[in-house]
Image (tube, rainbow, N blue to C red):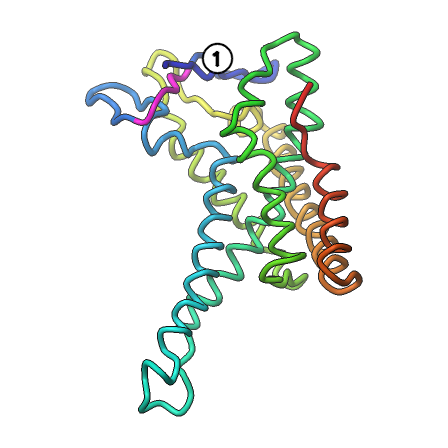
Amino acid sequence: KSVRLETFYMPGSKLIPTKIPFRGYFTPSKGHPHEMVGLWTIMSFTKWSFLLLGTSFLLSGLIPWMVILNNNDNNPTATVPPPPPQWMMRAALLTFEAAGPMTLLVSSVVRYALWPMALKKKSDTGPLKCTRAMFEHNGNAIMALTEVGVLGGLPVRLQHFSVAPLFGILYVLVSWTMANHWATRDKGPQFIYFFFDTTMGWTTTISLLTLLLILSTFYGLFWIASHYISQAFGGIAVNGLAITILASLVCRVRD
């Protein structure tokens, strides 16, 4: 099924709004602008944060698995099992610290901005309620909070707050790199999100600085949540209740 993502920009923009094809999981045709198909479907910020969280979980699962493989039973000549590679342990922590706050940001934007906007415009909210959207908009936040509260308990360090803004900066740079590949030349460059528009002068600068502040704020909020869930509370029941309350503040499943 073919769906077109319609771009829109603020008044005063020099860009021409158009529709970006968004369909399936097939390879784009050669000789045409990139459609949001195949790997290009991961160009939204939601999918970036969702995949980064999955990468963190993958690394966190590989680390204990490697410890089990390297224990004394399987390696009798070693007095102490060799630890997993440091780069893997660091990557697991940093990817979680970057993805965790972004999950709360994505869920909050959907609950408090996109969903009310769709209802106000009387638009179809079906795409926000489909199974995939539920996983990407709600499941991500629930999984991140569950990891902190009742599973591995990965720490979120305040001194690492820069990882979230750096993740956002990387996404902005990739979006700018792809700007000329979504439409034909007569339509000019296109951005999935209007606040990435580079033709607005100081408005663009203010928008990016605001985004930087938002990313830093959500990192702080996630740090506070993880700190109190993992240290101030205790037990699966209490932590589960705390996770439920926090998730209910950012998640939405119906109109």
Q: Residue at x 41, y 34 (%)?
A: 42
Q: Is residue 27 magenta?
A: no
Residue 88 against residue 146 in the figure, above or below:
below
Q: Assign a secondary structure to mark 1.
A: loop
Q: Dot 1 surroundings within 10 Å: few (below 14), some, or many (20 or more)?
A: some
Q: Main secondary structure of the magenta part?
A: strand
Residue placed furthest toward the left: 30
Q: Residue at x 70, y 36 (%)?
A: 250
Please state the horizontal and vertical placement of residue 108, each as a whole percent of the image. 68, 34
In which quadrant of the rendered image does the C terminus lie?
top right
* Residue where numbered disc 1 is placed: 17
Please state the horizontal and vertical placement of residue 8, each as a whole percent of the image. 54, 15
Please state the horizontal and vertical placement of residue 240, each as a whole percent of the image. 72, 51
Left or right of 183, for residue 229: right
Q: Which residues are magenta?
A: 20-25
Left or right of 48, for residue 209: right
Please state the horizontal and vertical placement of residue 3, each as a whole percent of the image. 41, 14
Task: Name the foreground residue: 207 vs 58.
Answer: 58
For residue 195, which quarter of the picture?
Answer: top right
